[in-house]
Amino acid sequence: DINYIIHAVPMQESRKFLTSMKSHIPCKVPILSVTKGVELGTFSLMNDILAETIGSDNPTAFLSGPSFAKEIMNGEATAVVIASVDETLSKELAEILSSVEFRCHTSRDVVGVELGGAIKNVIALAAGMCEGLDLGMNAMSSLVTRGCLEMGSMGKLFGANQETFWGLAGVGDTFGTCLGPLSRNRKVGYRLAKGEDLQDVLKSMDGVSEGVFTVLALEQMIKTKMNKPNVFDFKFPIISGVAQIIKGNITPKVGLNLLMRYPIRDENRGSS
């Protein structure tokens, strides 16, 4: 018997995988997704992909937060959040998965938790570039902070709960991914800033850097939602800059220089 299913396939392969596995997934069995990102082309989150491939008969939940696999395997203290529109399911999964070393909190904000898990990888790419250019901690702190504000702005655009971004799925995961030595996305940004070719970097990595694909999807996702492409660069300069770097239109040095030349404005009103 199958009581629960955990989905841990990389975002860009998830739709194909789930479609091929649909006939093997029992009806009504809850699915917990630990995949983070946005699908290229469709701009879908995992919540959308599961509904479109498996259907609505299987309850779903989504885990996010600062959770490097190596530290979890070593039994190091970790806290995450499990989001589901089914509050009973999220609490049930939290009770099953929680231990002294691994604590699970719950949320009903599926969109917010998923967006946080996607955007933090993009901010980490920028943080790695900042480190690779030896810009110092002042620049790094400012970059990560402004990146979190862009996360909140995007959440507002897509109807997420703003409080979600100040929790584990937002700033919590962002801090870990931007500053942690185990972060693949930070390493990619760092190596790009040192002059390496993107494809060479990706080919040499053991795992997947979701941020590389996510930033391109986010760019189009936001532009489509705003219906004002010219406003995108102004309201989301970090996401926009990283997208241009990944596409090869500018270098990390030029991108971060442009960010420092960003028009002066009220800090709080600028993110609304």
Image (cartoon, rainbow, N blue to C red):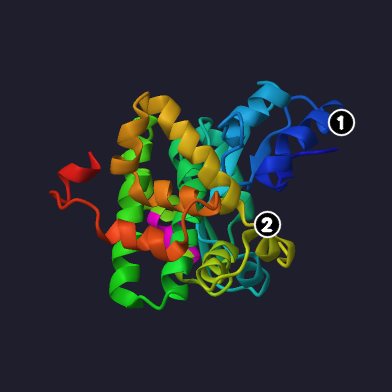
**Residue type at tag 2:** Val
Q: Position of residue 198 (x, y in %)?
A: 62, 60
Location of residue 27 with respect to 131 vertically, above or below: above
**Residue name at image x 58 percent, y 65 percent:** 188
Residue 73 falls in image quadrant: bottom right
Distance of label 2 from label 1 (alpha carbons): 26 Å
Q: Secondary structure at mark 1?
A: helix
Location of residue 223 with respect to 210 vertically, above or below: above
Viewer can see residue 199: yes
- Numbered mark located on residue 208 in the image: 2
Viewer-nearest of labels 2 and 1?
A: 2
Q: Nearer the viewer, residue 193 or 182?
A: 193
Q: Is residue 271 magenta?
A: no
Q: Nearer the viewer, residue 141 or 229?
A: 229
Apparent side of residue 18 relative to residue 97 in the rendered image (left or right):
right
Main SS, magenta region, reads helix
Q: Earlier in the sequence, mark 2 or mark 1?
A: 1
Apparent side of residue 17 relative to residue 178 in the rendered image (left or right):
right
